[in-house]
Amino acid sequence: MRLLRVGVTVAMLAVVWGAELAYACPACASPLEENRQAFVDTTVFLTLVPLAMMGGFVWWLRRQTRQPH
């Protein structure tokens, strides 16, 4: 029980002290249009690339399972 209490305390302290690290970068709230557009483009890129990789893997796996051996 004591170990659980210590773990919870450490986790709470990490959340409180780590909150300062969670501030957004200046580019995210920048009034410059090119900075905002770069943020949106990066968001789209970082969303689509993993989805494309997973889709490509599923496509490849499906092709492999349908090929006659």
Image (cartoon, rainbow, N blue to C red):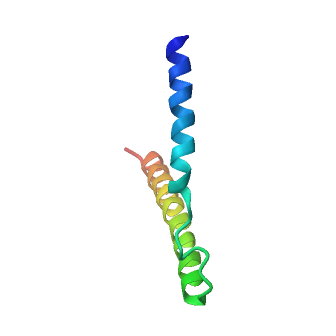
Q: Is residue 29 above or below residue 2?
A: below
- The residue that appears at 50% across and 52% down in the rendered structure is 58
Q: Is residue 27 above or below residue 8?
A: below
**Which quadrant of the view contains residue 44?**
bottom right
Please state the horizontal and vertical placement of residue 36, each as a whole percent of the image. Answer: 59, 81
Front residue of 33/13: it is 13
Q: Residue furthest left?
A: 69
Q: Is residue 18 above or below residue 28?
A: above
Please state the horizontal and vertical placement of residue 21, each as a whole percent of the image. Answer: 50, 55
Q: Residue furthest bottom?
A: 33
- The residue that appears at 51% across and 21% down in the rendered structure is 6
Quarter placement of the N terminus: top right
- The residue that appears at 53% across and 81% down in the rendered structure is 38
Quarter placement of the C terminus: top left
Q: Residue furthest top?
A: 1
Q: How many marks?
A: 0
Front residue of 68/49: it is 49
- The residue that appears at 56% across and 70% down in the rendered structure is 43
Please state the horizontal and vertical placement of residue 12, each as a whole percent of the image. Answer: 57, 34
Please state the horizontal and vertical placement of residue 25, each as a whole percent of the image. Answer: 52, 69
**Which quadrant of the view contains residue 16?**
top right
